[in-house]
Image: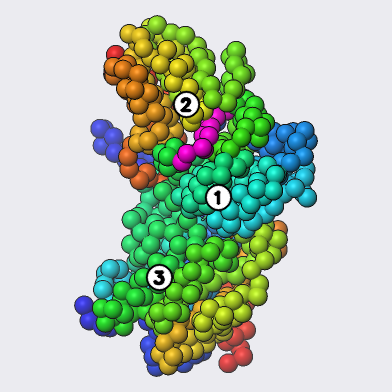
Amino acid sequence: MTATTAAGPTVKTAPKPKLKTSAMIASFADPGQKTTPAPFGHALVKAAQENEKIVGLTADLGKYTDMHIFAKAFPERFFQMGMAEQLLFGAAAGMAQTGVVPFASTYSVFAARRAYDFLCLDAAEPNLNVNIVGGLPGLTTGYGPSHQATEDMAIFRGMPNLTIVDPCDSVDIEQAVPQLAASEGPTYLRLLRGNVPTVLDEYDYTFELGKAKVLRGGNDVVFVSSGLMTMRALQAAKELAAHNVDVAVVHTPTIKPFDAETVLGEINTDRLVVTLENHTVVGGLFETVAAAAARAGVAKRILPVALPDEFLHAGALPTLHERYGLSVDRIVAAVLGAL
Amino acid sequence: MTITETVRAPETASLQERVARVEAAAYRMRHHVLNMGEAQGQGYVGQALDAADVLAAVYADQLRYRAEDPEWEGRDRFLLSTGHYAIGHYAALAEAGIVPVDELETYGSDDSRLPMSGMSTYTPGMEISGGSLGHGLTIAVGTALGLRLQGSGARVFNFLSDGELDEGSTWEAAMGAHHHQLGNLTAIVDINALQADGKTDTVLRTEPVLDKWAACGWFVQRVDGNDVGALLAAFDSAAAKAEAEGKPSVILCDTKVGRGVPLLEDREKAHFMRIDEHEWQICREQLTAGYEARTASEGESK
Ligand SMILES: Cc1ncc(C[n+]2csc(CCOP(=O)(O)OP(=O)(O)O)c2C)c(N)n1
Ligand SMILES: [Mg+2]
């Protein structure tokens, strides 16, 4: 690459490394961050050792949803349904009718968009214990709108009976899986796969289905976050401390049913309230919190950190998180701008 | 623009000339694929190599289009349903003069017009946004209906993968095309016997594929998708049959992952084929050596 300097002559500069599309299987973990391999797959195996009713299904995405770990451990309890998502959900409902407990995996986009009716009428209406596991939730792939499930929670929140879990890390996933299996009715887990960051072990925290948890206190700002954005919220809180901004973080891994009581208790103060979600600003955590506040008569301004109501670009994941405001830098800037 | 600017094999060319033209195009496209794969460090290279002959047959022999005007109304439509095969399609679009060869190295990079998964909003000549597999044939049915309704003689080609035969929507479209007697529609299925979790017959047994399409009322041919002569013959009879009977046609193409590069042909089949940094040059050399040996022996046998 050449550049013209003020002095006139053309000098050689090192080529700028090209930012490349994160592979489908890319991790959003920071370099050097502590991670745990395939927490969902291993947690499902563990749960299945204790509960012989648990079975696993996938729609040609076993390797990409960590279901392959279960398939290897329990080949006779694993069912490959082919790339046929309607069959996946219909069959999972049928199996649940007979008393077994299916975990059925695909990508979040296909779970939410492709086979909604099969989950809604075949599993949710009869309130069957069908557990849907969706890989690549929100913006966790650079493949563009065909693979970015930016509105999965918005779609699923409207489905009666469905429990929705948006885990932050490997700790959440490991603890959620047995609780999802034990809970009645259908569930949807926003899966984080591969080498998943391990974050919440450093906090006095346990995952409880249906419960929000205060991870840290703070006097100036309160973050209400779910999914991988809780990891970013904790990082942003640390950086904001350097700006003398004291930030509390409330983690709400269960999006539905929502723990309004805990969250309202935290936001009904003088602090700036910020919601953070790996999801479009439409129909996700921001609107869940806002609706809970309005319903309770809590008049608060709430600043959303969320994806815009747009079809997002293809590209490298770090580029896109920066572009759409999910990076730690962008969160810090948004908070400083709002204070 | 005059009709001479539409690119298609001249009707007067002999089959032998057409085969040579398509093989040469496929060879250049395979090089484009390797270069894109190297620039991105990854990609669906094995698939793009297996499909290069089919895509070359389409672009260098069958499709009517204007390179300078990719949205020319009278063009034949080529719909890539299998979004991740975009790398192969970009190679064809470069060969066709619709995308500059220099641009290929941006494949998969930020703000490139050539994203990893093909999208119509990004790339000239890309008719649909595929990638959510099993959509292409349904759109193709509508495209074929719309063109016919408006008196267009343009043809519609839909490329789909064997994995897409798992989706019910593909078969809904297959029945719809027959019901509406879409003689202007040709489906091309890349049967590389592979999908994401492994070999197709271990993921979902779709065979007997030929009988299924036939039962849906299609004119079916199954060929070696890496044999250009067989492909061109199949396209010719598909066109003749379509005209005669008003039946949609499907060409089932058995292809070999990594075709043209022995190093990759012999590697364990995988949806994401691992190719190490030092191997790209070896791949290019093997591709060139194979092509040169073949064209030399073909020259001698003439
Ligand atoms: C509707 C849908 N379900 C699942 C996927 C994820 N996926 C991407 S490629 C693929 C394999 C499909 O088979 P095929 O296209 O034949 O794979 P290849 O030959 O490229 O290995 C799957 C399941 C998808 N893109 N779309
Ligand atoms: Mg295939």
Residue at image location 54% in from the left, 25% down from the top: A210
Residue marked by disc 2? A258
Classify mark 3: helix, strand or loop: helix
In which chain is the residue bearing label 2? A
Q: Which residue is mark 3?
A: B140
For this view, does A225 lie left or right of residue A196?
left
Q: CA distance from mark 2 to mark 3?
A: 43 Å
Q: In the image, which disc is placed on residue A122?
A: 1
- Whether A166 is among the magenta residues is yes
Overall secondary structure of the magenta section: loop
Point out residue B259 in the picture as x, y percentages from the top left corner.
61, 68
Could you tell me the amino acid type at mark 3? Ala
Residue A175 lies in magenta, yes or no? no
Secondary structure state at the residue bearing disc 2 = loop
Tag 1 near tag 3, CB within 8 Å? no
Q: Position of residue A95 (x, y in %)?
A: 67, 50
